[in-house]
Amino acid sequence: MIQGISHLTFIVKDIEIASVFFRSIFDAKEIYSSEEKTFSLSKEKFFLINDLWIAVMEGESLSDRSYNHVAFKINDEEFDIYETKIRALGVDFKSPRPRIEGEGRSLYFYDFDNHLFELHTGTLAERLLRYSLGTCE
């Protein structure tokens, strides 16, 4: 039986820049660095975002951007705080998709290796309710 997500791994061109990205935006705590050792495919670092294990490994950046993304839940009251943190880091923002009022707000942004992240204020229950009451444009 699936118990949940074990970890997320991101391949990054520069592991130190990726470390700054995860610490600055997500307040991730670095818990492991392979340094020059290679136990896996390449140098790697592990982080915790709350209890979520994030692994970053050195490799080639994604060449294309897509809408595939990882979304993290934030409180609506913290939306502006996170937007300021993201803008201070200088990463690229993606315009938000059209929304039905009441389904939450989102910040979409790319890391330095073309991975798309989202910080979202809504919940699944809120979205399903809004979709059942709303109309598509």
Image: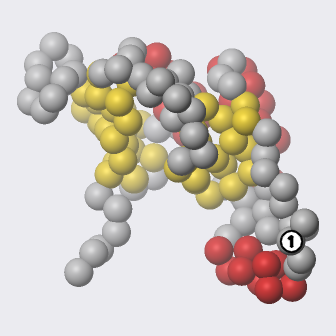
Residue at 29 percent across and 28 percent down: it is 57
Q: Report the residue marked by disc 1.
A: 136
Q: Which SS class for mark 1?
A: loop
Near-viewer residue (13 or 67): 67
Q: Is residue 55 above or below residue 120?
A: above
Within 10 Å of disc 1 (Cα), the crowding (few <14, some 14-19, many 20+) is: few
Residue at 79 percent across and 39 percent down: it is 95
Could you say where residue 74 lies in the image, as x and y percent from the top left?
67, 55
Q: Is residue 104 above or below residue 48?
A: below
Could you say where residue 51 lies in the image, as x and y percent from the top left?
39, 55
Amino acid type, label 1: Cys
Q: Would residue 102 be visible to someone looking at this image?
A: no
Q: Is residue 103 left or right of residue 69?
A: right
Q: Quadrant of residue 54?
A: top left
Near-viewer residue (118 or 134): 134
Count the numbered circles shown.
1
